[in-house]
Image: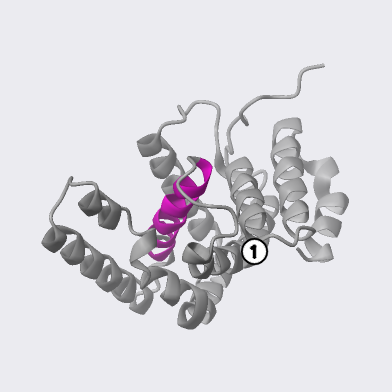
Amino acid sequence: MSDAILKHYQSQKHQFTDLFRLRMHRALSWCAKSGSVNDDDIRFITLWIAFNAAYAREAHLLTSSSERSEFRRFLQLICRLDRDQQVYNLVWDTYSGSIRVLLDNQYTFQPFWDHHNGLISQQAWEEDFKRAKDKVHRALSHKDTDTVLAVVFNRLYTLRNQIIHGGATHNSQVNRAQIKDACAILSSLLPLILQIMMDHHDQMEWGKPFYPVMN
């Protein structure tokens, strides 16, 4: 993570509310940790924790559906605040690499696993897979950044579930490609997301973080 965003936080944190400062402090601490580990699995986990620290609010229960809807709401908010389209430019620059590869990877697509668990047909997941990719292509052409990010983060969430719920072997060669792409995407996006949040800290209600500090 760039030192610039840490310096920005240090110079601006006196303006933040206690709750927003706590949210930033937690997210930045995990971002910094991700840059100090030489293990892609652990790096991905720390980056996801940083993302969670940035968006999660106390009012939302930690269920799969509510968590996905909450980070979709958060990404929409970030894109709305990003008036200079920095996120779109980053997504566009990254699309030819890590994002495109991640979206082409069936192993980060939850309906693929639903098919292999006997929940849906092969035709169903393949049609869903094509629709999701077409949706991203249309969204990119219309500069609909939050739709692109919603699809990308749904893939990242599937990967997160695989690791956190014990569905992957540590340092397995089976999922190296998606882990590396996920780390590349999150390590690029998170500092920019946190920067946008800090620049608009007083313009939005960011909510109360989970587990406030108890004295």
Residue at the image point whose x is 77% and y is 47% from the top? 29
User: What is the quadrant of residue 188 in the picture?
Assistant: bottom right
Instruction: Give, as a single range, the part of the protein colored magenta.
Output: 148-164
Report whether residue 84 is seen. no
Q: Where is the N terminus found, in terms of image quarters?
A: bottom right
Q: Where is the C terminus found, in terms of image quarters?
A: top right
Q: Nearer the viewer, residue 170 or 57?
A: 170
Q: How many marks?
A: 1
110 shown above or below 138: above
Say left or right for 17 vs 92: right
Q: Residues within 10 Å of mark 1 (few under 14, many from 20)?
A: many
86 shown above or below 10: below
34 shown above or below 27: below
Residue at the image point whose x is 55% and y is 33% from the top? 57
Say left or right for 35 vs 129: right
Residue at the image point whose x is 29% and y is 71% from the top? 133
- In the structure shown, which secondary structural element does the residue marked by tag 1 occupy? helix
Say left or right for 140 vs 199: left
User: Residue 164, position in %: x, y?
Assistant: 52, 42
User: Residue 12, position in %: x, y?
Assistant: 82, 50
Is 158 colored magenta in this rendering? Answer: yes
Q: Nearer the viewer, residue 142 or 180?
A: 180
Q: Nearer the viewer, residue 157 or 211?
A: 157
Report whether residue 131 is seen. yes
Amino acid type assigned to the residue bearing label 1 in the image: Ser
User: Residue 87, position in %: x, y?
Assistant: 55, 68
Residue, disc 1: 187
User: Residue 30, position in %: x, y?
Assistant: 72, 48
* Rendered image coloring scheme: one colour
Is 63 colored magenta in this rendering? Answer: no
Classified by dominant secondary structure, the portion drawn in magenta counts as: helix
Residue at the image point whose x is 39% and y is 42% from the top? 69
